[in-house]
Image: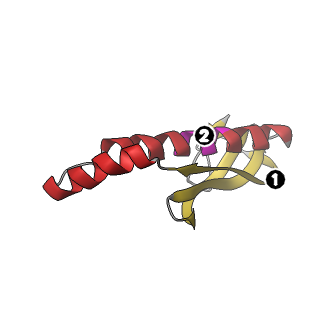
Amino acid sequence: MILTTTETIPNAEVVALMGIARGSTVRSKNAFGDLFAGIKSVFGGELGGYTKLQADAREQALSRLKKDAEKMGANAVIGVRLTTSTITQGASEILAYGTAVKIK
């Protein structure tokens, strides 16, 4: 499965548009991690726990995007985008979406 943010894939021809593929996940931070993040924010620097949480959430959203595209019979997704939104205090959604296509 090819995922790309571009609208075309070099040396490939789009032969069918399958529809919009999407994958999302909602993640929340934990209170224990918040305590350390609060302390760390006083001194500055990267909040490694939150960085990992967001990276894992992006990978899960992309994995779900691939599965959704495969269900449609696609072998590639073009125009892939990632968005995030706050669901509630301390929880956010990562959404991956794009156009599922068949290429040859």
Residue at screen point 52% across, 65% down: 89
Question: How far apart are the two marked residues, 2 and 1, measured between alpha carbons?
Answer: 24 Å
The answer to whether residue 92 is left or right of residue 76 is: left
Residue to which mark 2 is pinned: 60
Q: Is residue 103 visible?
A: no
Residue to which mark 1 is pinned: 17
Q: Is residue 85 above or below residue 98?
A: below
Q: Main secondary structure of the magenta part?
A: helix
For the record, the magenta segment spans: 58-63
Front-most of residues 30 and 74: 30
Residue at screen point 69% across, 41% down: 64
Front-most of residues 68 and 98: 68
Task: Locate the C terminus by quadrant.
Answer: top right
The answer to whether residue 71 is left or right of residue 26 is: right
Mark 2 vs mark 1: in front: 2
Circle 2: element type: helix
Tell me how many marks there are: 2
Q: Amino acid at mark 1?
A: Leu
Circle 1: element type: strand
Farthest residue toward the top? Answer: 1
Q: Amino acid at mark 2?
A: Gln
Q: Position of residue 48 (x, y in %)?
A: 31, 42
**Quadrant of the rendered image containing residue 3:** top right
Neighbours of disc 2 within 10 Å: few (<14), some (14-19), many (20+): some
Task: Locate the N terminus by quadrant.
Answer: top right
The circle on residue 64 is: none
